[in-house]
Image (spheres, rainbow, N blue to C red):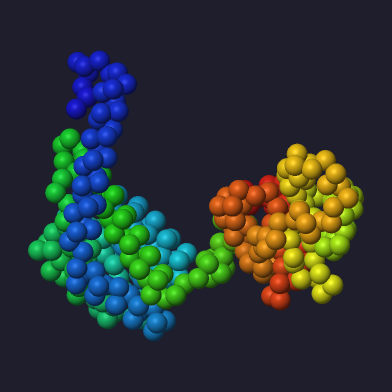
Amino acid sequence: MLNDSQSVDAQRILSRAREVMDVEISGVRKVRDELGEPFVALVKKCLEILQDGGKLVLCGVGKSGHISKKLAATLASTGARAVFMHPVEAMHGDLGVVSPQDLLLAVSYSGETDELLRVLPAVKRMGVPIVGITGKAESRLGTFSDMVVPMPVEREACPFNLAPTTTTTALLALGDALAMVLLDCQNFQLSDYAKNHPAGAIGRTITLTVKDCMRTGERCAVVTPQATVREALLAMTKARDGAVAIVDAQNRLLGIFTDGDFRRAMTANDQVLQAPIESVMTKSPVAINQRQMAVEILKLIEHRKIDDVVAVDDEGRFVGMVDIQDLPKFKVM
């Protein structure tokens, strides 16, 4: 522990920081290891509420409130209707956000938070079931709740064991686990996620399709397998592209030939310009369906270490080319 009488050097700073993280990691592990039937019951109840048209209402005050607000946002963005309700504001009108079809998730590690406890009788009178998420199952919150999800944490990372640190980290992990389990149970897909994130970097990455990013028409170099390497290079130059697609009479993709392929071919044979392109092309190249999302392009480029990806339709016919140099302007990398 650092104090004024000690010199604050780099090693001491890092040592204390790691100690805090170790305490919090230990707390998260304990919560993970003790997950059991109460968590399963919570998931099932959440699914029941959501399937019946209700929503999850998270309620907490102080640090628990901040985490609850974040968890409500995570749940809402991943397919589970959820809102945050501040318990104090609820007593002054915001209780109207709750309907009888909903489920209240009341969050307090001590289970004795007065501001939270005051709102519970009003919620119960509406016939809304209450789930208490707390470290003290025997607390007033635990006693008042219809269902309790225990969150046992041995100690805070705070040297006084007072400032919510380990408990809020564990609560965040528990809430994220709930959100991701519900996502899986509801078969929430990437396309569904895209609908909830139409703006920003995430939105661009998961709403843009390959078709939106690919080069077409005169900006694509395309030749038949009988073309010479020289003709293929001329096509690439005209299109200002670093690769050429080789297709058959039905426009089905046969291969690809890139600037890098040409340099390697020239090293092996300086007469390669007259050779048919099919003799030096890469057969069965990496291709992507034009209807796939832009994020899949990034995965291919990173995994295969390539600069050009051929786009095809459902029948495997060539429709365009994706060049890594074009992706920054679409802000997907």
- Name the residue furthest bottom: 52
Horizontal side, residue 153 vs residue 21: left or right: left
Q: Residue at x 38, y 75 (%)?
A: 185
Residue 39 % position (x, y)? 24, 69
Horizontal side, residue 280 vs residue 114: left or right: right
Q: Is residue 332 above or below residue 8?
A: below
Q: Residue at x 88, y 50 (%)?
A: 274
Q: Is residue 134 above or below residue 316?
A: above
Q: Nearer the viewer, residue 266 or 195?
A: 266
**For residue 225, which quarter of the picture?**
bottom right
Q: Residue at x 16, y 37 (%)?
A: 160
Residue 287 % position (x, y)? 67, 63
Residue 267 % position (x, y)? 75, 39
Q: Nearer the viewer, residue 69 or 273?
A: 273
Residue 173 in view (yes/no): yes
- Name the residue furthest left: 138
Residue 17 % position (x, y)? 28, 33
- The quadrant the N terminus occupies is top left
Residue 263 in view (yes/no): no
Horizontal side, residue 113 vs residue 184: left or right: left
Q: Residue at x 23, y 40 (%)?
A: 22
